[in-house]
Image (tube, rainbow, N blue to C red):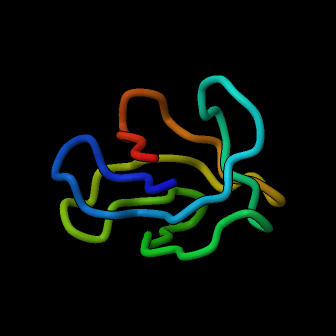
């Protein structure tokens, strides 16, 4: 699935989601392509700089309503 920035539509991740339901966090081992920019623990959009999540070690905790998911 493709995960895009809700603010500007830039592609952030190509991610392999397992199971149904909402995307609350992205596991690092399931991220196929990563286009985001990191500033400390903040995960940001490379184009507009919007914060889309927080780095938490093995996963990225997604900030809700900051992303759009396409299958």
Query: Against 63, is 7 above or below?
Result: below
Q: Position of residue 40 (x, y in %)?
A: 57, 66
Left or right? Give the position of 17 relative to 37.
right
Residue 30 falls in image quadrant: bottom right
Residue 20 falls in image quadrant: top right
Disc tally is 0
Left or right? Give the position of 43 relative to 19.
left
Residue drawn at x 44%, y 69% is 36
Most extreme residue toward the top, as rendered? Answer: 21
Most extreme residue toward the front, as rendered? Answer: 71
Q: Position of residue 67 (x, y in %)?
A: 38, 41
Left or right? Give the position of 7 relative to 52.
left
Q: Position of residue 57 (x, y in %)?
A: 81, 59
Q: Position of residue 27 (x, y in %)?
A: 75, 55
Residue drawn at x 76%, y 44% is 18
Left or right? Give the position of 18 relative to 44.
right
Residue drawn at x 46%, y 47% is 71
Query: Against 46, is 50 above or below?
Result: above
């Amino acid at each position: 699935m493709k995960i895009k920035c809700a603010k500007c539509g830039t592609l952030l991740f190509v991610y392999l989601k397992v199971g149904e339901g909402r995307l609350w966090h992205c596991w690092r081992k399931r991220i196929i392509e990563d286009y985001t920019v990191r500033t400390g623990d903040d995960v940001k959009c490379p184009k507009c700089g919007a914060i889309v999540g927080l780095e938490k070690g093995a996963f990225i905790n997604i900030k809700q309503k900051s992303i759009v998911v396409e299958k």
